[in-house]
Structure formats: structure tokens, C-alpha cells
Amino acid sequence: MADQQLGVLKALDVAKTQLYHFTAIVIAGMGFFTDAYDLFCVSLVTKLLGRLYYFNPASEKPGSLPPHVAAAVNGVALCGTLAGQLFFGWLGEQLGRKKVYGITLIMMIVAQLLPDYPLSATIMSEYANKKTRGAFIAAVFAMQGVGILAGGFVALAVSSIFDKKFPSPTYAQDRILSTPPQADYIWRIIVMFGALPAALTYYWRMKMPETARYTALVAKNIKKATQDMSKVLQVDLEVEERAEDPKLNYGLFSKEFLRRHGLHLLGTTSTWFLLDIAFYSQNLFQKDIFSAIGWIPKAATMNAIHEVFKIAKAQTLIALCSTVPGYWFTVAFIDIIGRFAIQLMGFFFMTVFMFAIAFPYNHWILPDNRIGFVVMYSLTFFFANFGPNATTFIVPAEIFPARLRSTCHGISAATGKAGAIVGAFGFLYAAQPQDKTKTDAGYPPGIGVKNSLIMLGVINFVGMLFTFLVPEPKGKSLEELSGEAEVDK
């Protein structure tokens, strides 16, 4: 066997960085912008919904969502995303990346439930050149950081405006007026802003051609792929016909796939699953952790609108100082030190810092030590993004064959969302105090924040071990990685 890559695909691999690369980054990244925006805002929305609709005038505490309602609010988007990644990942193989991504953009505008990881990653990997492919895919993923900041800034702006226009007393001063009816507008306005970027992106995506790798390797139309890329790259490319090797036409459930990529798929699914348990637990319940250590005042000392402002301010600060820089460190270094090293390093330091705040937890919650806790907690976010949160998204878009790439990425991403569901629901209950008199209304006693953080540290360590199943794609073409360049001599 010998490596013989199609000329049009070689041209893509060696193409200089051009405007269409950056256009593809923005277009493919809109799903992540919306996903991160919603993830950031869900904790703010649940706070408001609890105070607005589950207020008990006889209680000494502001209203909070009952467990089953909180689980539904936190879980519906994750469950919708899991199903969407499996279905639309598969559909991307049947109808093409362009058409299916257009469908998902429309659905995002309407429902905001289906940010499509498989198609975003696949589109960028198939458009990118070989030398900087990792950075381009990482830049798509870094749109999450933009979404997080957008969610923070919108929440800060809206809550600030309403707090000044409709001031209200604290819960302790007046239990009824501490949550003014105007607070109902805040969560609606915050949610509404999340759909705008997808609407603006749809027109741009429909103007770009289908990826050459789908057209040539899946749709089997090499002539069309060559014509499309000649326009995109602004060069003259010759049409090259090549006989297909039937040995490479194996399916997802075949022995050949299992032999070639079985361990790879196990590696991408397991690491994404474990990463998302820890990552979504940390993200969704930042407010609870910060309240537990006293960094955010107790809800009863603030009116509802001011509480939104305080939580948004704390979360935005974490994003600016650790989360967002982590994304761009990955963009800068992934094609230099490689995916494997970044993922292994990320899981390692997430484990170290999680244990460093968990075991001496009683030390960190003392008033004089809270800043140290926040710094250590922020570093776990930094190494999540300069680590497995980025690489688990990137690698599945590189190592599988074109006809199965979107499907395998969808399986990996859906497994990750299963981990997110475990993290969201599990931490919701596990982090409750062991003393049943101190739990939130409707919740049974849990194992406490300290033991929950120890569990997350163990999960990060196991993720580090499963990283050894994932190959290093740095510097190789997609066809070389997947074996699609192999033809008989």
C-alpha cells in the first residue's frame, strides 16, 4: 500500500491562511457561542425563576427552584444537545455538512437547544490546512469564551439598568418586594440575546460551498470538489479521478472499523465523558460554590436583581482571568506541542488544583483565605480550556474517515453531554450539606461541597489515564490519519 492523496485535498492541506479560513471559524463557531452563552446564563435564570415563582412568604430564605424543576431546567438543553449531536452528526454524513449545518442554525434560532458540535468541528477540520488545522479548530471552540463573556456582559448590563430603575429592598427587609415583577423581564431579555448570532450566521454559511472532503470522499464527486476549491483558494486545480479501494469502504459497525479506530473512539468518548462531568459541574454550580465560601453574599441580603448582578460579576471575572485565556493558549500552542500533550497536561493540573482546594477545604472557606480559593478554582478552569475541554472537541474531527467523521464526532460529543448530565444532576444533589437542616428546600442531604470536589478530582485523574488511548494528529493530513490515502500500488 502507498499514500496517494487527491490533488484537491493536498491543495487544501498546503494552502496559505486566507480570509475564508477566518470566515469558517466565525461561522462554525456560532454554535459554541450560543452554547456557552446559554450555559453561562442558566445559573442566573434559575436564580430568578426560583425567587419569582417559588416564593414562600413564611420562609426565612428567598424562593428557589424545587429539585425536579431545577433538574428539568438544567437538563433539558443537555438532553436536547445529546440527541441532536447523535442525529445531526449522522445526518451530516447523509446530506452533507453545508445543508445540515444550515438546518441546525435555523433550529438554534427557534429553540436554542441544538448547538451542533459535530458539524462545526468537521467543517473547520475539512477546510483547514495541515500546518495550522489544530489552531483553526481550537479557534472555533474558543468562540465558547466569546459566548461566556457575552452572557456575562448582557447579564451585567440588564441587571444594572433594572436595579437602578426599579430599586427594591433586600429579602430580609421586605420578603414580598425583594423580588420585583420587573425581574421577570431580565431573564427573558438575557435568553433572547442568545439567538441573534445564529440568525446572522445563516446567510454567510449558505454562501460557502460544501467541504471538498465531503464532496470528493463521501459524495464521490471529485470534479465538483475541485471546482469549489478552485474558487475558494483562487487557484487553478486539475480534476483528478481515482479508483476507490473497496477495502476502505468499511462501516461504523464493521470489524475493520473496530480494528482501525475502535480504541480511538473509546479514547475520544471516555475522555469527553469524564471531562464534562467535571467541567459542567464546575460551570453550572459556580454560584453555589462561591456562596458556600462567602465570596457572594447570602441571597437574603440582596434583592433578586442585585443578586443576578453579583453572580454575573463573579462568573465574568473568572471567565476573563482564567476560562477565556485558556482557550487562546490552546490556539497558540496546539500545533506546536500537540493535542496529546495539552490534554494530558490539562487533566493533570485539573486533578492537582481540584485536590488542592478540596482536601484543605475548611481552610479555604475562612474569610482571609477566600481569594486563594478563587485563584485555585480559576486555575482548574484555565487548564480545562488549555487542556481537555478543547482537545476532546478537536481530535475526533481529525482522526476518523470522512464518511464517518461527523458521526464519530457526534458520538463522542453526545457521550460528553451524557457526562454533563451526570455532572449537572449529580453535583446538584451531592453538594448538599450532610446536615439535613442546612440543605436547600426539597433536597435530601448530600456529601457536601468538599467531598464533591474530591470526587471531581478523581474523575479528572481517570480522564488523564484514558488520554493514552487517543492518537496524536499533529502535522498529519486527515487522509493520512484516517487511512483514506491508502491505495493499492
Image (cartoon, helix red, strand yellow):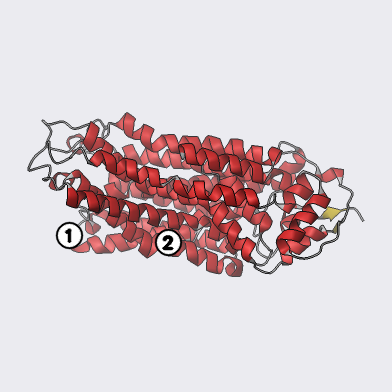
Residue at far right of view: 489
Percent of width and height locating residue 484: 78, 52
**Residue at the spot of label 2:** 324
Q: Nearer the viewer, residue 157 or 270?
A: 157
Give the vertical position of 234 relative to 47 (above or below).
below
* Separation (CA) of disc 1 from disc 2: 27 Å
Q: Which mark is residue 367?
A: 1
Q: Nearer the viewer, residue 209 or 287?
A: 209
The residue drawn where x is 8% and y is 40% is 174
Mark 2 crowd level (few <14, some 14–19, many ≥20, 10 Å Cα): many
The residue drawn where x is 44% and y is 57% is 145
The residue drawn where x is 18% and y is 32% is 55
Q: Is residue 489 left or right of residue 333?
A: right
Q: Quadrant of residue 489?
A: bottom right
Q: Quadrant of residue 26?
A: bottom right
The residue drawn where x is 54% and y is 62% is 342
Q: Quadrant of residue 316?
A: bottom left
Percent of width and height locating residue 361: 27, 54
Give the vertical position of 443 relative to 121 (above or below).
above
Secondary-structure class at tag 1: helix
